[in-house]
């Protein structure tokens, strides 16, 4: 498909104020959000329910108007443009297919509005239906399709107009778990094939990890952290982010000594060595962020702990251990051949190199 | 912290959409002009007095007369053409054309003039509420006022009770016979199809002095159906099916487990009904009561036909207006009184009870209810309902027979002579006029109501509340009041300037009245249809580049096609059977079926009246059959409907 110039999206100090329908008080649904989405990249807005993801997306689409700030599509400010004048296309959670049209007419809707000649239109539609693997279903009515197929029609309908930006609002949340996994791979594949800029809203962190170039974590209307999935996972900048993405354990301690790029942290009086890229100083109270798979149990080590739960999960052995009064959840992957601790055993906890992060 | 940037942006986006802006502006103007303005004129007429009187010139000069003086010392008098002229009091002598004799004769130059006997005509304008105490002191009006309220009480009470019984039997009792169920269906659709006064007509035919039942069967020779009980019975039979349908909707939503819980704790069936079911339904019953009350108060045709000397507000106002009363203020004040009654009830119903009903009975019943199979409940209730249904159906059947019998009360042999007379007469023109005018009104109403519902449900803009309220307001305006309002508002043009005066007395104004009368019904159905549609369907059309007109035509309208089609037919049926407003506005240029029926019935020519009514019922019934067929075959596809659920 012929590519036009790719455009990115820039949000410049965007806020949206709503009135609480019950109390009538105004509150920020989105507050001072600034971000740059590079052309052709896939960015995910991730956050708990009510954090303002949909609102942000709808402001980009033009269904809501920001109360502060300006939105740019490429270099052009688009605040005052109506949704139909913006070069965006949205894929809705409910798919929002036109129930009175068949697959072909659904996909053709945007092209007809652009007054495309019939021949060219047919070609474009054939190509896009091929891409979403719906060839041969042109004349089906939308209710004669499965959920996944409907989702792909919605995708095709949005993409066929070759928008500068594709917007997704939890497009997979109505599908069952298996289909969700295969569809997200599909969406990523198609987006990469076409190279369209995409903004994707979800509250499923696994989904976000799997498909994004960048993840933006939102909380209560503000951006909590932005970064690649790896950065977000391994270097969460706040307890909220660490907790929101994946399983996490927090271990509190005091920095007792600082060395070259590392420091010693005393937990319950037991000293452990941790990398210290953020330059914590001696005497500082800190929290160690420990992912379950980053801890190793052994018969010797720095941090003694008591096993409170041990159970076999197939891919890994699941442990709950008590470090002092703190419960730590661990996952020991591929436990075959290693010692399996039982409830009541005393073991020593150590950390995988570079996998522990200080807050 | 509220920033106005989003408001400013919304405004810019709004004005970047000329189609929307123009549509909204146009709608606002139309609604204001054809609904609010006539009512406002009525209100104004009832309190704003223009009084012309003759004042002796000598008194004007002496300054003792009560004459409007302007600052420059001139007085404003009316010349012989009714135009206002400013003159100096000193120059009155030569002001020919403005001078009158005591008897009102215009004095001409050269007339012999008695200086003591020269008058000028002055007009005084002032605001007063005098008209209201005056009309209440008027015996006829006063009686009519209380008659109307009494009638409203009786009718709505009766309708709610019977409606409740039908709804209860329908939802709770295991009615085994399919014939009985079928009868229920027929009874609930009949009043939709039927012209308003059909039941009155058959009441007279069956139970009147020459009534088939009273006289022929029972041998009663002095039966009198005219009067309050006649109207009350006819109105109850006309309106209870509406209550039935409303209450049925409510009962269906009561979760059976609540009642089962009460039964479980040992309550008897009656106890459950009075302690659980009834309290839950109370707001809904109140709602049904008020709706019926409004209908009864606004009803014109039945009191007109069967009321005899029992006058209601609607008929009294009609008689005042057509009887050529000179008390402009009084007639307007009466209409205002009638309007106030319905308006207050409407506001209570809409803003208080409707919300309450929704609050107590929200959500769906979790599962089917175990129907009552107990003979002691089932048999008597079923029989009672069947009897009432059979009675209503019989009343309708009487109409075609009234047209087919040679001479009701004397000669019960069949003949087509009434139909022949109808067509020999100007019956054909009446059908043509009624049919055409209704046919013109229906697409206009259907489209307007879909546009209004679209704007109300899917759009945000200033003045939305106005559009919604005014288009619903028409529901609370009795036809008679609207008719009087249109006379006052348009007979002399808008604000008596002559603007739009051309439509007065033409078919256009009749079509407008039809549209106004049906708009609330269409809008309500459009709104509820649109509320079911996921808003993201339209948003995705916008998002793909469609403007608002395109979205409406290519997405919204097809999705509410059923509502549009039923709006078409409902308007047609309501228009062709309408009488209360149009009877005040129709001119000899147009003959309307309903008005003809009324005329013939007044004359006692029941044969022709029945012939008209029979054909009218056939037309409306056919329209509904066609609509159902079209909806079934070309309506919104089943799948769409399923999806909406
Ligand atoms: N039209 C509105 N009027 C008032 N408040 C609103 C409106 N729309 C959204 N909100 C509020 O704004 C906040 C953010 O809503 P938003 O829909 O963006 O959340 P979200 O992050 O998409 O959540 P979810 O994951 O549940 O979809 C919520 O508190 C919501 O209640
Ligand atoms: Mg959302």
Image (spheres, rainbow, N blue to C red):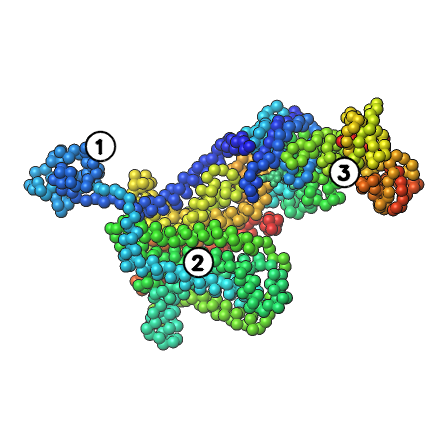
In the picture of the structure, the residue carrying the numbered disc 2 is B292
Q: Report helix, strand or loop for mark 3.
A: loop
Residue B71 is labelled as 1
- Residue B623 position, x and y percent, is 47, 54
- Residue B513 position, x and y percent, is 38, 48
Q: Nearer the viewer, mark 3 or mark 2?
A: 3
As drawn, is B220 to the left or to the right of A149?
left
Q: Report helix, strand or loop for mark 2.
A: helix
Residue B96 appears in the figure: no
Above or below, A112 relative to B344: above
Q: Report helix, strand or loop for mark 1.
A: loop
Inter-mark Cα distance, 3 to 2: 62 Å
Q: Chain of mark 2?
A: B
Question: Which image quarter: residue A86?
Answer: top right
In the picture of the structure, the residue carrying the numbered disc 3 is A246
Q: Residue furthest bottom?
A: B219
Instruction: Looking at the image, tell me whether mark 1 or mark 2 is earlier in sequence order.
Output: 1
The one of A326 and B184 positioned closer to us in this rendering: A326
Q: Chain of mark 1?
A: B
Inter-mark Cα distance, 1 to 3: 87 Å
Give the residue drawn at x 81%, y 38%: A292
């Amino acid at each position: 498909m012929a590519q036009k110039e790719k455009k990115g999206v820039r949000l410049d100090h965007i806020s949206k104020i709503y009135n609480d329908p019950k109390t009538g008080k105004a509150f920020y649904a989105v507050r001072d959000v600034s971000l740059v989405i590079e052309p052709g990249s896939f960015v995910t807005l991730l956050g708990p329910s009510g954090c303002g993801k949909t609102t942000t997306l709808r402001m980009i689409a033009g269904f809501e108007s920001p109360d502060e700030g300006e939105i740019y599509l490429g270099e052009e400010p688009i605040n005052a443009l109506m949704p139909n004048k913006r070069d965006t296309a949205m894929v809705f959670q409910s798919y929002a297919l036109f129930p009175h049209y068949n697959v072909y007419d659904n996909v053709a809707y945007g092209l007809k509005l652009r007054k495309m000649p019939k021949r060219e239109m047919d070609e474009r539609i054939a190509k896009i239906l091929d891409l979403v693997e719906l060839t041969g279903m042109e004349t089906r009515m939308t209710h004669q399709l499965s959920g996944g197929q409907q989702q792909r029609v919605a995708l095709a309908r949005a993409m066929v107009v070759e928008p500068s930006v594709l917007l997704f609002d939890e497009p997979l949340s109505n599908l069952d778990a298996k289909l969700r996994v295969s569809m997200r791979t599909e969406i990523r594949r198609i987006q990469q094939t076409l190279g369209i800029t995409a903004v994707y809203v979800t509250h499923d962190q696994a989904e976000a990890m799997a498909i994004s170039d960048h993840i933006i974590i939102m909380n209560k209307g503000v951006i909590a952290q932005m970064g690649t999935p790896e950065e977000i996972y391994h270097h969460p900048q706040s307890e909220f982010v660490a907790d929101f993405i994946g399983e996490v354990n927090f271990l509190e301690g005091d920095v007792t000594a600082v060395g070259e790029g590392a420091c010693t942290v005393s937990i319950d009086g037991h000293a452990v060595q941790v990398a210290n890229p953020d330059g914590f100083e001696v005497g500082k109270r800190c929290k160690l962020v420990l992912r379950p798979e980053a801890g190793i149990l052994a018969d010797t080590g720095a941090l003694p702990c008591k096993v409170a739960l041990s159970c076999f999960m197939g891919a890994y052995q699941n442990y709950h251990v008590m470090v002092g009064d703190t419960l730590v959840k661990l996952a020991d992957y591929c436990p075959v051949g290693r010692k399996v601790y039982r409830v009541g055993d005393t073991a020593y906890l150590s950390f995988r190199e570079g996998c522990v992060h200080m807050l | 912290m509220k920033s106005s940037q989003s408001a400013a942006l919304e405004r810019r986006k709004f004005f970047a959409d000329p189609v929307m802006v123009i549509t909204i502006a146009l709608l606002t103007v139309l609604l204001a002009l054809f609904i609010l303005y006539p009512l406002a004129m009525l209100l104004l007429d009832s309190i704003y007095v223009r009084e012309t009187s003759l004042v002796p010139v000598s008194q004007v000069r002496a300054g003792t007369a009560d004459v409007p003086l302007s600052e420059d010392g001139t007085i404003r008098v009316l010349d012989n053409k009714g135009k206002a002229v400013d003159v100096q009091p000193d120059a009155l002598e030569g002001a020919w054309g403005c001078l009158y004799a005591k008897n009102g004769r215009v004095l001409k130059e050269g007339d012999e003039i008695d200086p003591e006997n020269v008058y000028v005509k002055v007009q005084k304008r002032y605001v007063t509420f005098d008209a209201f105490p005056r009309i209440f002191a008027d015996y006829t009006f006063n009686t009519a006022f209380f008659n109307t309220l009494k009638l409203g009480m009786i009718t709505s009470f009766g309708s709610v009770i019977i409606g409740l019984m039908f709804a209860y039997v329908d939802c709770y009792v295991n009615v085994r016979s399919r014939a009985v169920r079928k009868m229920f269906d027929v009874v609930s659709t009949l009043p939709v199809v039927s012209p308003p006064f059909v039941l009155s007509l058959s009441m007279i035919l069956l139970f009147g002095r020459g009534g088939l039942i009273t006289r022929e069967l029972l041998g009663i020779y002095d039966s009198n159906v005219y009067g309050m009980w006649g109207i009350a019975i006819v109105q109850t039979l006309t309106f209870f099916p509406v209550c039935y349908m409303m209450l049925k909707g409510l009962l269906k939503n009561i979760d059976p487990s609540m009642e089962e819980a009460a039964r479980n704790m040992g309550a008897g069936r009656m106890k459950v009904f009075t302690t659980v079911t009834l309290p839950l339904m109370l707001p809904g019953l109140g709602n049904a009561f008020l709706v019926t009350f409004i209908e009864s108060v606004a009803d014109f045709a039945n009191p007109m036909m069967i009321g005899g000397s029992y006058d209601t507000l609607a008929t009294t106002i009609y008689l005042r207006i057509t009887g050529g009363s000179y008390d402009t203020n009084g007639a307007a004040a009466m209409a205002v009184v009638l309007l106030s009654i319905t308006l207050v009830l409407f506001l209570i119903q809409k803003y208080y009870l409707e919300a309450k009903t929704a609050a107590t009975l929200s959500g769906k019943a979790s599962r089917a209810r175990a129907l009552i199979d107990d003979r002691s409940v089932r048999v008597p209730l079923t029989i009672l309902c069947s009897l009432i249904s059979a009675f209503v159906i019989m009343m309708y059947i009487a109409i075609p027979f009234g047209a087919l019998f040679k001479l009701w009360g004397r000669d019960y042999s069949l003949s087509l002579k009434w139909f022949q007379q109808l067509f020999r007469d100007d019956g054909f023109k009446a059908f043509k006029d009624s049919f055409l005018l209704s046919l013109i009104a229906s697409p206009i109403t259907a489209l307007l109501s879909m546009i209004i519902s679209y704007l109300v449900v899917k759009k945000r803009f200033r003045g939305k509340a106005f559009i919604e309220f005014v288009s619903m307001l028409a529901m609370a305006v009795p036809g008679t009041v609207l008719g009087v309002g249109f006379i006052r508002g348009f007979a002399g043009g808008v604000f008596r300037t002559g603007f739009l005066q051309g439509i007065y007395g033409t078919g256009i104004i009749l079509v407008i009245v039809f549209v106004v009368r049906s708009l609330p019904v269409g809008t309500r159905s459009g709104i509820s249809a649109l509320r079911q549609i996921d808003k993201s369907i339209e948003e995705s059309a916008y998002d793909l580049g469609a403007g608002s007109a395109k979205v409406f035509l290519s997405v919204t309208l097809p999705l509410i096609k059923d509502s549009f089609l039923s709006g078409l037919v409902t308007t047609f049926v309501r228009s062709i059977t309408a009488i209360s407003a149009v009877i005040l506005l129709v001119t000899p240029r147009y003959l309307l079926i309903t008005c003809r029926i009324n005329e013939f019935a007044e004359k006692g020519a029941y044969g022709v009246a029945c012939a008209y009514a029979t054909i009218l019922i056939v037309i409306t019934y056919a329209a509904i059959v066609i609509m159902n067929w079209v909806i079934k075959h070309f309506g919104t596809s089943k799948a769409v409907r399923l999806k909406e659920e």
